[in-house]
Image: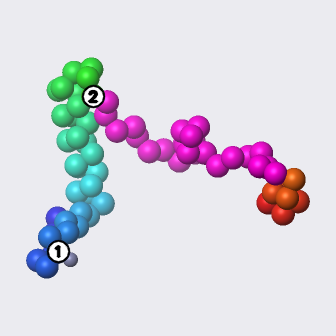
Amino acid sequence: MAQCTSCEAIFLSRADLGLLIEQENDWHLSQGPRTQPIPRIKPGMTPPPDLAPAKEARSYLDELFG
Ligand SMILES: [Zn+2]
């Protein structure tokens, strides 16, 4: 982990980020059912329905040019 001295941004290595996620999930487990751990990101995951791009054309022009 490194911190920028001018803007205080924190830079994490991929390994540090993984550790942080593990610790976050452990914390959620220790908090009981009120909070949810971060879901594991896996290849082939689909976004939640409200974030998925619309598959149907929104208009006739979209159908022609979309
Ligand atoms: Zn900076």
Q: How is the image coloured?
A: rainbow
**Is residue 51 found left or right of 21 in the rendered image?**
right
Residue 16, horizontal then vertical, whole percent: 23, 57
Quarter of the image holding residue 31? top left
Compared to residue 11, the image places residue 61 above or below, namely: above
Residue 37, horizontal then vertical, whole percent: 31, 34
Magenta segment: 36-59
**Secondary structure beneath disc 2?**
loop
Ligand 1 within 8 Å of disc 1? The answer is yes
CA distance for labels 1 and 2: 31 Å
Looking at marks 1 and 2 on the same chain, the residue that comes earlier in the sequence is marked by: 1
Q: Is residue 40 magenta?
A: yes
The residue lying furthest to the top in this view is 33
Residue 15, horizontal then vertical, whole percent: 26, 57
**Secondary structure beneath disc 1?**
loop
Residue 57, horizontal then vertical, whole percent: 79, 49
Residue placed under numbered mark 2 in the picture: 35
Compared to residue 62, the image places residue 8 above or below, namely: below
Closer-to-camera residue (25/52)? 52
Q: At x 23% / y 27%, what residue is drawn?
A: 29
Q: At x 55% / y 45%, what residue is drawn?
A: 51
Residue placed under numbered mark 1 in the picture: 7
Q: Are marks 1 and 2 in contact (CB under 8 Å)?
A: no
**Is residue 56 found left or right of 43 in the rendered image?**
right
Residue type beneath disc 1: Cys
Q: Is residue 56 magenta?
A: yes
Quadrant assignment for the C terminus: bottom right
